[in-house]
Structures are given as structure tokens and as C-alpha cells.
Image: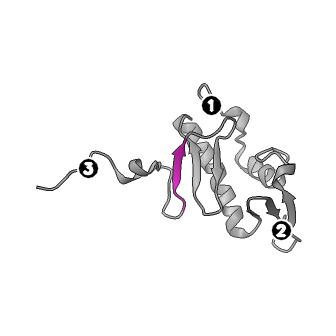
Amino acid sequence: MGYKMKTSISKLLGMNAELSTYDVPVFEKNLPKKILGTANIDRTIYVDKRLSEKDKKDVVEHEKMHINQFKSGEVSYDSKNIYYRKTPFSPIQKILRDSIQEGAHNLPWEASIYKKTGVFPDKIKKNGI
């Protein structure tokens, strides 16, 4: 007689199976205040698990666009800097992470995504957070 798991592997790992794809897994976590989601350089996404399902979907759509920016070479980062280029042939700009507010609408890599999606973080309410 075999053992039957009462939950799926994705739930055990904290993954959202509906929003994940084979190459971009989405993990649900308690994120700090004002952070709805993050796209990581390893092509994973963290989304705040306290958001509604619709808001999670909107946040993941936004973060997947950052993943595409990573893939295209438009944006990259390390622990101290963000590297940005407007076009594939423009020079890379090195921006100190401490000198900016990450996720701000006026950052060029954020502004281009907000323009495409029309979804802004201030329209998404964190449930009591």
C-alpha cells in the first residue's frame, strides 16, 4: 500500500502552479511592505501571497516583463548596481541601487512596462498590509 500525498509538490514549495510556467516559476511569499512582487535574475518571481488572485496575476504579468528585459539584455543587476540599456546597441548605464527607489514609475525600465500594461502598483491594494 503506497503513501498518498495530501498536497501537491508546488504547494509544498510555495509555488503558484496557475501563474508559473515551465521556465518562470512563481513563488508566493510574505514580502515587505510596499513590495508586491519581484523578478529575480535567476528567472523566478516572488509575489506577495496576501494579494488577491487578480492582483497576483497583474503583478506576475509585470514581473514577467522584467524577466523578458533580463533575457534581452536590456536590464540586469547585482547586489550593488542595476545595468540598463535603452536599445540593444546603446551603451550600458550603471546605476547604484542605493541611489534609486526600486520600482519607482520614473525609472526607464519600469516606465516602459507601466506604459504597456497600464497597471500601476498604487491601483493594487495590499490586503491590510
Disc number placed over residue 126 in the picture, else none: 1
Position of the C terminus, as image quadrant, is: top right
Residue type marked 2: Thr
Q: How is the image coloured?
A: one colour
Quadrant location of residue 95? Answer: bottom right
Residue at (71%, 38%) from the top-left corner? 121
> Residue 88: horizontal and vertical position, in percent?
81, 72
Q: State how many labels appear.
A: 3
Q: Which residue is mark 2?
A: 87
Query: Residue 26: within the magenta?
Result: yes
**Which label lies toward us, 3 or 2?**
3
Give the residues in magenta.
Answer: 24-29
**Which label lies toward us, 3 or 1?**
3
> Residue 81: horizontal and vertical position, in percent?
80, 60
Query: Please, what is the dominant secondary structure of the magenta stretch?
Result: strand
State the separation of the CA atoms marked 3 and 1: 32 Å
Position of the N terminus, as image quadrant, is: bottom left
Disc number placed over residue 5 in the picture, else none: 3
Name, please, the residue furthest toward the bottom. 89
Disc number placed over residue 108 in the picture, else none: none
State the separation of the CA atoms marked 2 and 1: 34 Å
> Residue 46: horizontal and vertical position, in percent?
58, 49
Q: State yes or no: discs 2 and 1 in contact (Cβ < 8 Å).
A: no
Residue type marked 3: Met
Q: Is residue 14 left or right of residue 69?
A: left
Q: Foreground: 50 or 67?
A: 50
State the separation of the CA atoms marked 3 and 2: 49 Å
Query: Which circle's residue, 2 or 1, is located before the other in the chain?
Result: 2
